[in-house]
Image (tube, rainbow, N blue to C red):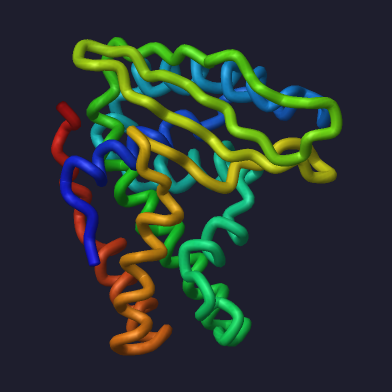
């Protein structure tokens, strides 16, 4: 149950944009402006911090907890990735799944930090009607190679817009993991998935650069 090295790199790269380096804005901030505001800041922050690019796990954990998690509905992301088995999981298993999934993504994230170079983010025009509470924000990462499609699914909540899924080059993060997790759960159960996630998240990050 593992992604290809290229897919891991792309998925981790997607997470870079979630690293929110500015204070929270008003709850009525539009989702496209949210993405645009934070993207420029995160890229600049990482470019200036060699320890982040070199995979300093302590700084990465602090960065994600302080600046990413407040803007991500991580419980929804984890439950969607686990799929139907989430309903049968105990409260303890749910918390462990969420913790280990988060750790796995942080590990992947750390492997992608060294990829940050001269990238810029272009936010495409938002298609959103008045009253919409679930939207798709499309962006494009521009760098030395071909542009990379990077899309976000966001839901309007009481505290503002929350990201709950990512799409890199046409592949949705949650659906990709859901297929992998289902194989493990069907074969060996939820506890086995937790152990597998724990073993993967504890391994040193070694993600190849996306071409």
Q: Number of numbered discs present? A: 0
Q: Position of residue 41 (x, y in %)?
A: 51, 17
Q: Residue at x 34, y 47 (%)?
A: 57
Asked whether 48 or 79 is in front, the reply is 79
On screen, residue 109 above or below 193: above
> Residue 185 appears in which quarter of the rendering?
bottom left
On screen, residue 35 above or below 184: above
Q: Is residue 94 left or right of residue 106?
A: right
Location of the N terminus (image quadrant): bottom left
Q: Position of residue 112 (x, y in %)?
A: 27, 36
Q: Residue at x 23, y 54 (%)?
A: 3
> Residue 2 appears in which quarter of the rendering?
bottom left
Q: Position of residue 146 (x, y in %)?
A: 23, 16
Location of the C terminus (image quadrant): top left
On screen, residue 187 above or below 34: below
Q: Residue at x 52, y 46 (%)?
A: 165
Q: Is residue 116 left or right of residue 82?
A: left
> Residue 95 appears in which quarter of the rendering?
bottom right
Q: Residue at x 73, y 23 (%)?
A: 30
Q: Position of residue 147 (x, y in %)?
A: 30, 17
């Amino acid at each position: 149950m593992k992604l290809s090295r290229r897919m891991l790199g792309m998925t981790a790269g997607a997470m870079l944009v979630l690293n929110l380096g500015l204070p929270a804005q008003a709850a009525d901030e539009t989702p496209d402006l949210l993405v645009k505001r934070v993207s420029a800041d995160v890229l600049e922050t990482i470019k200036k911090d060699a320890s982040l690019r070199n995979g300093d796990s302590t700084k990465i954990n602090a960065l994600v907890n302080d600046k990413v998690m407040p803007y991500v509905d991580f419980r929804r992301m984890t439950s969607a990735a686990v799929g139907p088995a989430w309903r049968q999981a105990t409260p303890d298993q749910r918390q462990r799944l969420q913790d280990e999934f988060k750790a796995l993504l942080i590990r992947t994230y750390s492997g992608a930090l060294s990829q940050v170079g001269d990238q810029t983010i272009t936010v495409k025009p938002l298609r959103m009607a008045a009253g919409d509470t679930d939207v798709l924000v499309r962006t494009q990462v521009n760098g030395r190679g071909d542009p990379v499609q990077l899309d976000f699914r966001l839901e309007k909540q009481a505290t503002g817009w929350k990201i709950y899924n990512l799409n890199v080059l046409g592949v949705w993060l949650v659906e990709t993991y859901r297929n992998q997790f289902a194989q493990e759960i069907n074969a060996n159960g939820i506890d086995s998935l937790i152990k597998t996630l724990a073993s993967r998240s504890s391994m040193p990050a070694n993600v190849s650069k996306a071409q």
